[in-house]
Amino acid sequence: MFRPSLFAMLAATTMHGAPAPAQAASNEEELKLAMVDTVVVTGRRDGYDQHSTSTATKTDTPLKDVPQAVSVVTAEQIADQGLRSVTDVLRTVPGATVASGEGHRDQILLRGQNSTADFFVDGIRDDVQYYRGLYNLERVEVLKGPNAMIFGRGGGGGIVNRVTKKASDRNFVRGATGLDSHGGWFVGGDGNVRLADGLGARLNATYEDFSSFRDHVDGHRFAINPTLGWDLGDETRIDLSYEYNHDRRTVDRGIPSLNGRPLKGAQDDFFGDPDVNKSRLDAHVVDLSVSHRFSDSIRWSGKARYGDYDKAYANALAATPVQADGTVGMEAYRSTNKRQSLLIQNDFIADFATGPVRHTLLFGVDYANQDSRATRQQGYFDASPTAVNSRRRLFVPIASADDLPTITFRDGATAATDGSTDAVAWGVYVQDQAKIGEHVELVAGLRRDWFSLDYRNNVNGQKLSRDDALWSPRLGLVLKPNENVSVYGSWSKSFLPQSGDQFSSLAATTAAFEPEEFRNREVGVKWALAPRLDLTLAAYVLDRSNTRAIDNSGNTVLSGEQRSKGIEASLSGKVNDRLSIAASAALQRARYRTTSTAGAAGNDVASVPHFTTSVWGRYDFDQRFGVGAGVYHQSKFYASSSNAVKVPGYTRIDAAAYIGLTDYAELQLNVENLLGKDYIGLTHTDNNLTPGAPRTLRGTVRFSF
């Protein structure tokens, strides 16, 4: 829900890249990570490794001591690869796949669990539906497996946390501008000024103009993020941040299918109305973070976020496969969603010992109040005598799918199209990280959530409510045979109320149902192959239960089950001073074990390939010149849970060059899809299949002073 950044997209639009390693040594720290898309590295490059995180446990913990799979994508890697969005970032993460999100939002699948809401910023919930950028980020952290013990409801397959840049007491100015071969361009900046001892102000801002290989697809967005950082001695730190995000873009629903496969030869073709398919977002978010150390062993941190989001979109889309006569059925709708959110969390941490056991004890309380109003209106082809389904569907030749007759939007005859929700959640949790000697660590946590949802149908005045009080446990064991290797096992459970991750599906029937449950069993190995090179291997089984199904009498019951199981591997960091690498691979299978409203027993979950792999490397010949190359592959998958449309797998090759122009400027050139492969990258339904971009050239110039 917080309007994240947008820089990433921009930089990606012109391909971020970390500058050539090398400028004056005195600038090394100051220029280490400029911005995600204006990353400028002028001293020793750190590569792509991250050694610790506070997201997984809410304490600063080495990744090797976290008993679950965690993938961290640093700003440097994002820049080098030219990643443009959260979708691009997640393609590099094992166990993560992506969907098209109806062409207007981020939509992810972590270990086969579909979500539009399992996003966080600096550990605070960010569940509004929109496209997140990367312009103000230090890194993206992806935690795999149920995470309700730390974060509350949802997080069944994992969560995505974006870590933002903070103000410091240094002075610098950084910027970037770029252009791609489809006409898209961006400009962005990152500046910090020292105001006084311990007091700094920072401003990240970006503007991106969209232009696509797809017909009629364009748009723009602007984001600005001023921050203040204040160190009050060594004990207290205060951070205050405001972000405004303005996004206007075409809603692109992709292309339809033909005979169970994506329609061939239609990669550029637009199926919709260019004047109707529009999305807009305006978001204002204020963040306050305070941390204080009472002593060497006791500390506290508090965070608060207020967000005001105004989102609206409309679209016409292909609702059927291409018919035998060469026509396709088109439908339309439009929707709005306004949400105001207040989220607060407090964490107390104490370090102490009981005999030979050293403890890091966490006690936390969090609160959320989210008020939303969502509307949806159906589109009608009133003036078209050939329209069917009460004029809601019109069959047109595929050549005319972007030249539709007038569409009228109005409320449907039966279904509610205007609803208000008030969601209030309290969470109390405790966690102990116990170190038993030098070779054994135990992580145990328990959380109690109280979740209340009030819903009002503004069409007919019906009111519904639901209250849940649930436990979320977590247990993990880490064995460290030596300093460089850890072996772990874990078990955890999460829940999701039957109202869904956007509170939008509460009805008279579902209001009485128990939440869905997610249970994860996982084992893994983490191995530091070198001081800056880490290998992770994990295997898991994740079961989802209490999903809705229809019994033989036509009644809705909770008998649906889904199972995901797989093996994940990742290797990231620096092989040596010249070579940085980020590689991942995953074998996974996500299937419905029993029939539910989501899918039939035995069917594969949509958008989950059985095999994915991503490999990227950057090699620096000297301080002025480097090259990068990578490959991404995924096997075939199904476009929806019907398993009626199979999307072919594909392999994509990318490349880059990094040229240091001066001590303060760099040129980066990226080529995406070097071999010009035609492929479908994202899907939403059997007839919303989004083509991947053809060969794309991007150039970016970055500077730093």
Image (cartoon, rainbow, N blue to C red):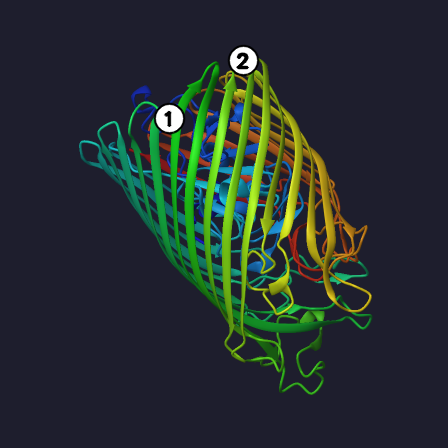
The crowding category of the residue bearing disc 1, from other C-alpha atoms within 10 Å (few below 14, some 14 to 19, many at least 20), is many
- The residue furthest front is 355
Q: Secondary structure at mark 2?
A: loop
Q: Is residue 106 left or right of residue 46?
A: right
Residue at screen point 73% across, 48% down: 562
Q: Earlier in the sequence, mark 2 or mark 1?
A: 1
| Residue that carries the numbered disc 2 in the rendered image | 483
Give the amino acid at mark 2.
Answer: Glu
Quarter residue 18 falls in: top left
Q: Secondary structure at mark 1?
A: loop
Q: Is residue 114 left or right of residue 345?
A: right
| Residue that carries the numbered disc 1 in the rendered image | 42
The residue mark sitting in front, 2 or 1, is: 2
Q: CA distance from mark 2 to mark 1?
A: 31 Å
Q: Is residue 36 visible?
A: no
Residue 510 vertical position relative to residue 576 in the rendered view, above or below: below
Is 402 in front, or is 480? Answer: 480
Q: Position of residue 308 (x, y in %)?
A: 38, 60
Q: Position of residue 352 (x, y in %)?
A: 40, 22
Q: Is residue 26 visible?
A: yes
Q: Position of residue 580 (x, y in %)?
A: 53, 24
Q: Where does the C terminus fall, quadrant-wise?
A: top left
Is 164 in front, or is 433? Answer: 433
Give the amino acid at mark 1.
Answer: Thr
Q: Is residue 463 left or right of residue 547?
A: left
Q: Where does the N terminus fall, quadrant-wise?
A: bottom left
Q: Which mark is residue 253?
A: none
Residue 139 vertical position relative to residue 278 in the rendered view, above or below: above
Is 41 in front, or is 131? Answer: 131
Q: Is residue 652 left or right of residue 38?
A: right
Quarter residue 138 falls in: top left
